[in-house]
Image (cartoon, rainbow, N blue to C red):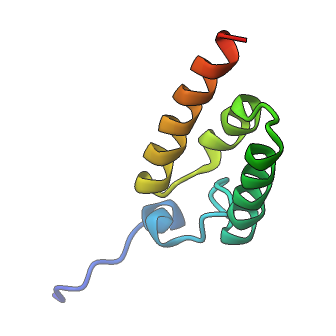
Amino acid sequence: MSDSREFASPACSANEADDAYMGFASRAEITVFLEDLEAAERAGRPQAEMLRRMLPKVRDEALHRELVAKLRIQESIESNT
């Protein structure tokens, strides 16, 4: 008997799949989003809705935390206007 393990289904290897395959935003999508977010910020346009749409698609924990913090700031700003 061998020590190597074979999984019964591809789902067991899901953590190895590409983010886009798993329904998360690809690196390219995140890059475009961050550029759009920065442009909206420079133009003084609201960003909360952009952030709400992207957050469920962000798999990277550090980026997700950063975007949640930005969303809270934006919601605060937008609620005061």
Question: How many marks on residues?
Answer: 0
Residue 19: percent from the left, percent from the top? 60, 64
Identify the residue at horizontal 45%, vertical 65% (top origin): 15
Foreground residue, 46 or 56? Answer: 46
Foreground residue, 10 or 60? Answer: 60
Foreground residue, 4 or 56? Answer: 56
Identify the residue at horizontal 75%, vertical 30% (top origin): 49
Identify the residue at horizontal 18%, vertical 89% (top origin): 2
Q: Single out the residue that lies furthest toward the top.
A: 80
Foreground residue, 2 or 65? Answer: 65
Identify the residue at horizontal 62%, vertical 28% (top origin): 74
Decide if residue 67 is on the left or right side of residue 45. Answer: left
Residue 9 seen in this snapshot: no
Residue 32 seen in this snapshot: yes
* Residue 1 against residue 47 in the figure, above or below: below
Q: Single out the residue that lies furthest toward the bottom.
A: 2
Residue 34: percent from the left, percent from the top? 69, 58
Quarter of the image that includes the N terminus: bottom left
| Quarter of the image where one finds residue 29 | bottom right
Residue 55: percent from the left, percent from the top? 61, 41
Residue 27: percent from the left, percent from the top? 66, 70
* Residue 8 against residue 22 in the figure, above or below: below
Quarter of the image that includes the C terminus: top right
* Residue 17 against residue 4 in the figure, above or below: above
